[in-house]
Image (spheres, rainbow, N blue to C red):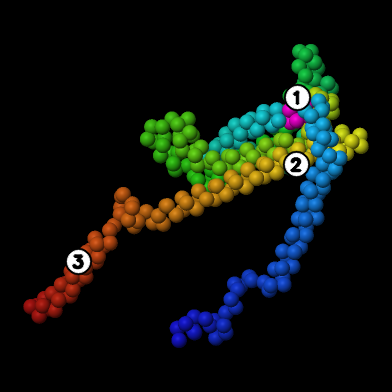
Amino acid sequence: MAGAVSRLGSKGTAHHPYDATGESRWVRYTLITVAVLFLALFLFVPLASVFFEAFKKGVDTYLSALTEPDAVSAIQLTLTVAAIAVPLNVVFGVAAAWAIAKFDFRGKNLLITLIDLPFSVSPVISGLIYVLMFGAQGWFGPWLEAHDIKIMFAVPGIVLATVFVTFPFVARELIPLMQAQGSEEEEAAIVLGASGWQTFRHITLPNIRWGLLYGVILCNARAMGEFGAVSVVSGHIRGLTNTMPLHVEILYNEYNFAAAFAVASLLTLLALVTLGIKTLVEMRAAREHSEDALERPADPVLAPSSPKGAVSEPATQHTTQHTTQQASHQSQQQPLQGQAS
């Protein structure tokens, strides 16, 4: 009878095996089909066409396109710019996230807004800003020219543009993570005599390592694939200031499709490797989070493994029995006291 009642609703109707938000089978299959078709049309087919066109004229043509001097220079410049921009963004991202998540100060909301600025400004506009500042007719152009310092149409300008468009990634990954963790552990470490560097190295950094690595991966992917801002400040000098995306554009405009798709396939391969690493990082972080949740007791006061404040089951039973006996003894004494009075 109890089982039959449990299967009935408040009005005596049987519950559907699916939950309240469940859809019919044809709706789910339709949505899945639309999603798969969309991914195939806008992601898988273009991705496959890049490698198909790259190897269309044979492996020798593919390798020669990647080993020519201009292509080698573009690959080296891309990796160099990423190797400079990513560490700078890591330092800024960690410092900004630490300040925003751990402290309250005037201008905090303004700092968060400035961090989000590259997301709202077009990369072409950001490159133009550097041209107006450091170009020959810019604010600092005459001074830089007088001291023979070249920023625009050189590697420093490319690094500056890349840093600008990529600096939100690390900070934006760490800010919500550090806010959720709070500052209790850091405060406890400082009270126990740890220095600021020791607190960061032994407390903060281990807690944010997966979020930091995730932000570094995203930052590196954007740095290697950036086109708009770099296109404005580079000058398109072949063999000197062309990164891989710019080199692909030049080859394609010259109708050298085989070489263009060969370099594009290498850039795509780097993106796929980055995506694979990102997926592994997410899986590892989720696994450690689940392991920590299982190892951490739900209530540390009542947990058997708690070193302080733990209450064992025999002690609890003894206390309950003693309280019950005491209450029974008092209830028996009350009638006797009434008769004596």
**Residue occupied by mark 3:** 322
Q: Quick one: label 3, few (<14), some, or many (20+) residues within 10 Å?
A: few
Element marked by disc 2: helix
The amino acid type, in three-letter code, at marker 1 is Val
Mark 1 lies on residue:
155
Relative to 69, residue 191 above or below: below
Residue 38 in picture, x, y percent from top left: 78, 58
- Disc 1: CA contacts within 10 A as few (<14), some (14-19) or many (>=20): some
- Quarter holding the N terminus is bottom left
Residue drawn 63% across the image and 70% down it: 21
Which residue carries the number 2 mark?
268
Numbered range of the magenta stretch: 73-78
Q: Residue at x 44, y 41 (%)?
A: 185
Residue at position x 28%, y 61% from top?
A: 313
Majority secondary structure in the magenta region: helix
Location of residue 56 by image quarter: top right
Percent of width and height locating residue 41: 80, 55
